Amino acid sequence: MIKSLLSAGLMSLALLAGHAHAANAANASCEAKAIDKNGKVLAGAAKSSYMKKCEGEAGGGGTCEAKALDKNGKVLAGAAKTSFMKKCEGEAGGGACEAKAVDKNGKTLAGAARTSFMKKCEADAAAGQK
């Protein structure tokens, strides 16, 4: 009995340590990439913003479920969570269309032009998958 409890405790500790190591590896990778366009290390608010974005993309909270938080950091629930999840999962699958949504000058499309483009692009992508 004590032996099984001890082994269960060690297993959970090992899993926790593995997860922490992965998070530290992602953090170290983001830390190394936190450089501005002039090659200087980012600092202050710029670094904080970059690190938050980088760690989110690197898998530290990369799933939609982990990102389903309100502006105060509380977990979303009910209709708000459903709406967020639908939008998040749609964006995860529609990344190719998002990247292509630019005008002839290379600026990101906005408003009705963006809506129309995204609708057509996603329909074309869905037809291509069938």
Image (cartoon, rainbow, N blue to C red):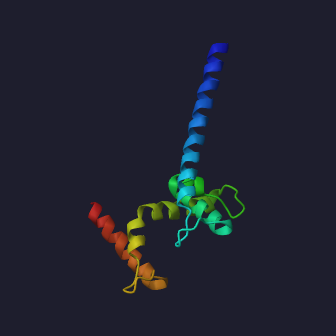
Q: Residue furthest bottom?
A: 105
Total number of numbered discs in the rendering:
0
Place of residue 83 in the rendered image (x, y in percent of width and height, measured from the top left): 56, 63
Q: Does any portion of residue 11 appear in the rendered image?
A: yes
As drawn, 53 above or below 105: above
* Residue under the point 29% across and 61% down: 129
Quick check: 51 left or right of 108? right
Give the quadrant of the C terminus.
Answer: bottom left
In the image, 123 versus 106, the foreground residue is: 106
Q: Is residue 102 above or below residue 87?
A: below
Which residue is depicted at the point 65% across and 19% down?
5
- Residue 55 visible: no
Q: Quadrant of residue 19?
A: top right
Residue 43 on image: x %, y %: 65, 66
Q: Nearer the viewer, residue 16 or 72?
A: 16
Give the x, y percent position of residue 84: 57, 62
Residue lying at 62% horizontally and 17% vertically, measured from the top left: 4
Q: Residue 2: give x, y in percent of width and height.
A: 67, 14
- Residue at point 69% right, 64% down? 71
23 or 117, nearer to the observer: 23
Q: Quadrant of residue 1?
A: top right
State whether residue 93 is above or below residue 111: above
Asked whether, in this view, residue 124 is left or right of residue 20, the answer is left
